Image: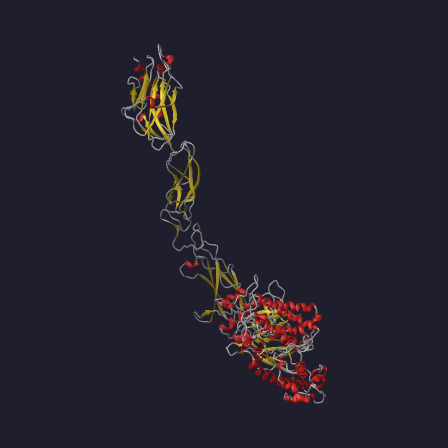
Amino acid sequence: MDCKTLTLFNFLSTFISIAELIIHPSNEVNLLDSKASQGELGWISSPSHGWEEISGVDEHYTPIRTFQVCNVMEYSQNNWLRTNWIPRNSAQKIYVELKFTLRDCNSIPMVLTCKETFNLHYLETDEDQGSMFREHQFSKIDTIAADESFTQMDLGDRILKLNTEVREVGPMTKKGFHLAFQDVGACVALVSVRVYFKKCPFTVRNLAMFPDTVPTDSQSLVEVRGSCVNHSREEDPPKMYCSTEGEWLVPIGKCLCNIGYEERGFACQACRPGFYKASSGNVECSKCPPHSYTHLEGAVHCDCEKNYFRAEEDPVSMACSRPPSAPRNVISAINETSVILDWSWPADSGGRKDVTFNVVCKRCWPGPRQCEPCLGAVRFLPRATGLTNTTVTVVDLLAHTNYTFEIEAQNRVSSQAPTVRQYAAVTITTNQAAPSAVTVIRKDRTSRNSISLSWMEPERPNGIILDYEVKYYEKQEQETSYTILRSKGTNVTLNGLKPDTTYLLQIRARTAAGYGSSSHKFDFETSPDSFSISSENSQVVLIAVSSAVAIILLTVVLYIVISRFCRYSKSKHPDEKRLPFGNGHLRLPGIKTYVDPHTYEDPSQAVHEFAKELEASCIAIDKVVGAGEFGEVCSGRLKLPSKKEICVAIKTLKAGYTEKQRRDFLSEASIMGQFDHPNIIRLEGVVTRSKPVMIVTEYMENGSLDGFLRKHDAQFTVIQLVGMLRGIASGMKYLSDMGYVHRDLAARNILVNSNLVCKVSDFGLSRVLEDDPEAAYTTRGGKIPIRWTAPEAIAYRKFTSASDVWSYGIVLWEVMSYGERPYWEMSNQDVIKAVDEGYRLPPPMECPATLYQLMLDCWQKDRNNRPKFEQIVSILDKLIRNPSSLKITASTASRPVNLLLDRTSTDITSCHTMGDWLESARTLPCKDAFSGVSYSSCNTLAKTSAEDFKKVGVMIAGPQKKIVSSLTTLEMHSKNGPVPV
Ligand code: AMP
């Protein structure tokens, strides 16, 4: 056996133990595998007698090609074996795996140059070198030594050790390379040569696909973006890193299966029929819930079976449901005209918990199908629809009447079901019942000894009213003795009453069922003696006479004034007549702004935004205290749950109103509800959901300021009056800060409470037009309370806070003159003219000069020169802190030049005696009144005290003041002559 035969034998026998050769990790990509070649490999052997290519079979008897060399019997061996050209593809780093056997030199007898290693070389080129082979061009990769070599003995045992060595080459830059094996005298057999590079193989991680990736650089990781598998979407962008070892590292982000798809085997697959998936996410498809199905793949929800439904807000995971069956076992308990209905839960709630009940009321007459829906008066407690409990109380039914109640159960899918109503019905007959209480009583006429009243039939008569019982007694008597009258109609006159006495009165109605409950106690006053025309009281005569004197005197004065006005207006420069423009009041930042209810498309929305809706049952009406534009104003009480009962004023909207009237009436509440200030009348709430419609405000015991002052003429200290004025100014400052212009500020629109606190009221949108009896039509068509309104507002409707300041000046005058009428009996036209020409009201009697100066400032023609309300408040505060400043009265101080009455006719200057003056004033009746008193001059009369007036029979303050005002003027004229214009 020669050497070559020996080695071949050796090689073949080794295949028995090298089955692992063909298995390699999937992240390796072969560039060359000698075992895969069926035919000759065609590698170049140099010299030709060196390496020898030999065919063999592996353990599966698959033919393979191997190379061997074993020239151990000769010196100086240098045998090269060069591979074919191997293209590099994209790889930078190449691995060379060699499997070989090597003979132990010691086991070969008589060897000369035996080595136990060989060398591995490579040559990078861009193209195949073909048959050209130059040894020196190659670079050495490494010397390859065998871990284990075999001996003769191993051959005998047929156990040959296969060596496997792997070497890395790179980074490579050229397109390909040749490998070469250099033998320098070993006995070696190359069983296989595999050249490969590593890659990160295609993979699916977190439902994202990552493609085959070859590491580009031997140092760093390659970041790879994954793409979501079909039927999935990115949740977080999926990413991984490919290492130089061909391993995927650090998976980040993920994809989620779409709705209707679930994750199965690294893919998103459609839900099977009978299953659904409504949300994206890597959860499994769910089985269709009860009473639902799907025959399709990839369902996102299941459809409901016939006669089963899903409510809009039901989740798709919820079973389909159906309407409930009818309620069961309805029972009724009748109590006069109310009934309590009770029933059991339906046998089938349709698979839902949200069952509610609706109760329909029908009034029935004997005979088939003689029923019709109950009218609105019937009330359900707590309500008729959407009941969650199985009981309801129905009240305010008619007595002796048949009713049928249909009780229907519903759940949230009822509206989707066919319209067959499922209900349980019960029929009842109400019992006899007494009438309800009389609630509205009106005082029609009052005299000293009688009161005429009328009232409205009770809301629920519950039968024919036979008569009314009217019970009354003196308030002081505390019901110890009382009188009862019966009336068939709804009015009565109580005669034989005491004058100036308060009576309490209650009314109740009677039907065949008996008396109804009594009304609240209403109190009414008879007129005082002094009001009776038939009275013989001489004092009253004196009052009448003195009033007449005053009026006549005034007429004279006005006559003079007006004639002066006419002359003056002719001479006046046209510029002086021009009215100033521009609003002197700026809005303050940070303060709430008034919202005009007109800006709401639906005015009732404004009411509900700014006013609280009150239950009519919380309000008790006591008596009528006034008449408003839209109906009576009553006093009463408001008791809100868990609050103390309070006194309130209740404005009612009279029956038969139009929609516009209702809107206008409620607009006052929409405005008032926006304010919150101690000097603005406070709104408690409104009643709009039942009739009568009401506006409820705090109660102001002393009513309107003008009437209150007239009633208490000369009874307050100046400080008390200034305190009231300060309150009004403070309320007005608040309104102007909110951007609200009142337009009708006047004492009649100020209310006074029991602590003398004054509050601004009257805010209706229509008030200036309709409500105010003082309002008159101007030439421009608007209706304006002329005496209280600034000239620019009259002339061209320039209403601003500055025009409110003008009105405030008039209120100041009204207060200081205890409710005197501004400009007395002058006509509106004359007032406009006089004011326009610069004349102003004179100071009221005993008016402090400072306050009169404030009035004049408020009446500055140029509205920019008028004080702001803020300044007025601070002026009044200073006066209150320093009362001595109020001691100098305007009449004793030097008078400003522009007083209304300072501009009277020069005729006054020609009045030298009292008789002349009275004569010229055509005040003869008045002259008579003075005839018994020797007043020698106007001077003396001007100094007349209130006591003196009383002596001659001028009893009331108003005329006294007028006379004094006029005469003070007279005095001035007689001293100084007319004041120049
Ligand atoms: P009005 O509709 O504001 O003009 O009110 C008519 C009358 O009812 C007033 O002149 C007052 O006498 C009376 N009045 C209005 N509101 C109240 C109230 N809050 N407190 C007391 N009386 C009031």
Residue 554: percent from the left, percent from the top? 63, 84
> As drawn, which residue projects farthest toward the left?
39
The quadrant of the image that shows the N terminus is: top left
Q: Is residue 962 above or below residue 118?
A: below
Above-or-below relation of 19 to 496 = above
761 lies left or right of 222: right
- Please tell me which residue lies in front, 846 or 221: 846
Please say whether residue 522 is visible from this viewpoint. no
Residue 849 visible in the current orientation: yes
Name the residue nearer the viewer: 114 or 483: 114
Q: In what quadrant of the picture does the C terminus appear?
A: bottom right
- The answer to whether 887 is drawn above or below residue 182 in the figure is below
Quarter location, residue 193: top left
Q: Is residue 887 left or right of residue 217?
A: right
Q: Is residue 545 above or below residue 358?
A: below
Quadrant of res 566: bottom right
- Corner quadrant of residue 493: bottom right
Quarter of the image where ligand 1 sits: bottom right
Residue 341 horizontal/vertical position (percent) = 52, 63
Q: Is residue 743 left or right of residue 282?
A: right
Figure label count: 0
* Residue 823: % across, % down: 61, 80
Towards the viewer: 373 or 893: 893
